Image (cartoon, rainbow, N blue to C red):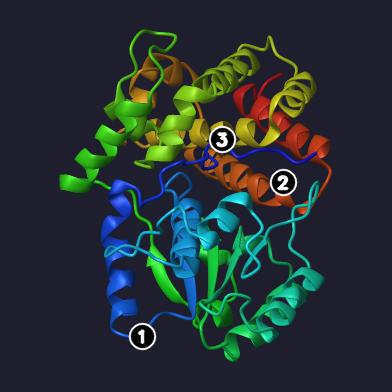
Amino acid sequence: MKTQDPDTEPQVPECRPLPWQVPLWRLLQQARAQGRPPHALLLHGPPGMGKAHFAQLLAQSALCGSPDEEGLPCGHCRDCRLFAAGNHPDLLSLEPPADKTQIHVDQVRAIGEFLALKPQYGRAQCVVLQPAEALNESAANSLLKTLEEPTPGALLMLVTPRSAALAATIRSRCQHFLFAPPATGTQREQALAWLRERLPQAGAEGEWDATRLLELAGGAPLAALRLAQEGGLEVCDAVLQDLERLAAGEGDPLETAEKWLKSDAKASLYWLYHWTAEVLRLRLGRQVSALGRGRQARLAQLVQGLDARRLFRLLDAAAEALRLLDRQLNETLLLESLCIDWYETLNPRR
């Protein structure tokens, strides 16, 4: 079963860079104006920063017949109409096939075949590959050959939240653009304003607080929007409640694993990792997140008597499970193992 990341970037309708992306956009347009456009870009940073939107917008701009002075696509020429319809002949988009988690070598070979042809409309050729960390070993080796011999006038964009998962040889042949969460200053205010305009009218506890949501999402605006729109906080609370039931001896670890599998395995694992980190912070006397501060009394009950070394092991196990979940392993055994570990940690004498 292919699960969905709790902060996968939602669709963004704007035909322009998001407010916090404007500096990166201007930097790229300046390079194009100076006649030194990049051949390969690595667009990386945490989920929810709009990297996929930026890549699509950049591809449309490169293919547009009459972009404006800011490099933005016009939206009405033949190229833009074809792009909007999803069938521009000079654009190739690669992602894992349906019900698969990896990009295979045959898909990457198609990039070489695509770039061997001349552009249909003579302006450029664009390839968008995402998520780049989904490349299997053979596909990565094949892509390296393409990067080593760039095609003039072509732009290859790799989009990933985990650039470290890519081979160093691939990373070294790309120009890096980091989409970091806007922490302070104008960009953060722009991100908050953007978020406030798009929040639902009210949440379960009243009006949404954009500042709090942004902090809960690690500063990623699109991830914050998803939390509000798609029940991310409900999954978050459900996982904490499951841990509390395991601590009280009222929950069964196998039943808990089955529940997470049926609802959303990856989202549940994401929040398990989050709560493990919060409990560990509390155990070490560190400050917890905004979400943790709102539930600090409940976390304090979980942390009683827990050993920090065991918590570090649980955190590592949750991180490894998140990584392995995309490798088509047995999800049931993976979740059951985690829930049993937590149950035994919380109930050492049972």
- Residue 62 is marked as none
Q: State yes or no: discs 3 and 2 in contact (Cβ < 8 Å).
A: no
- Which amino acid, by three-letter code, is at mark 1? Arg
Q: Earlier in the sequence, mark 2 or mark 1?
A: 1
Q: Quadrant of the C terminus?
A: top right
Outermost residue toward the bottom in this view: 149
Q: Nearer the viewer, mark 3 or mark 2?
A: 3
Q: Earlier in the sequence, mark 3 or mark 2?
A: 3
- Residue 36 is marked as 1
Q: Which residue is mark 3?
A: 6
- Indicate the secondary structure of the residue bearing disc 3: loop
Count of numbered badges drawn on the protein? 3
Above or below, 103 relative to 255: below
Q: State yes or no: discs 3 and 1 in contact (Cβ < 8 Å).
A: no
* Separation (CA) of disc 3 from disc 2: 14 Å
| Quadrant assignment, res 200 | top left
Q: Earlier in the sequence, mark 3 or mark 1?
A: 3
Q: State yes or no: discs 2 and 1 in contact (Cβ < 8 Å).
A: no
* Separation (CA) of disc 3 from disc 1: 38 Å
- Residue 325 is marked as 2
Above or below, 14 relative to 140: above
- Which amino acid, by three-letter code, is at mark 2? Leu
Q: Position of 282 compared to 266: left or right?
A: left
Residue at 50%, 30% in the rendered image: 275
Whether residue 288 is visible here, answered yes or no, is no
Return the x and y of residue 227 as percentages of the image width and height. Answer: 47, 28
Above or below, 326 relative to 125: above
- Indicate the secondary structure of the residue bearing disc 1: loop
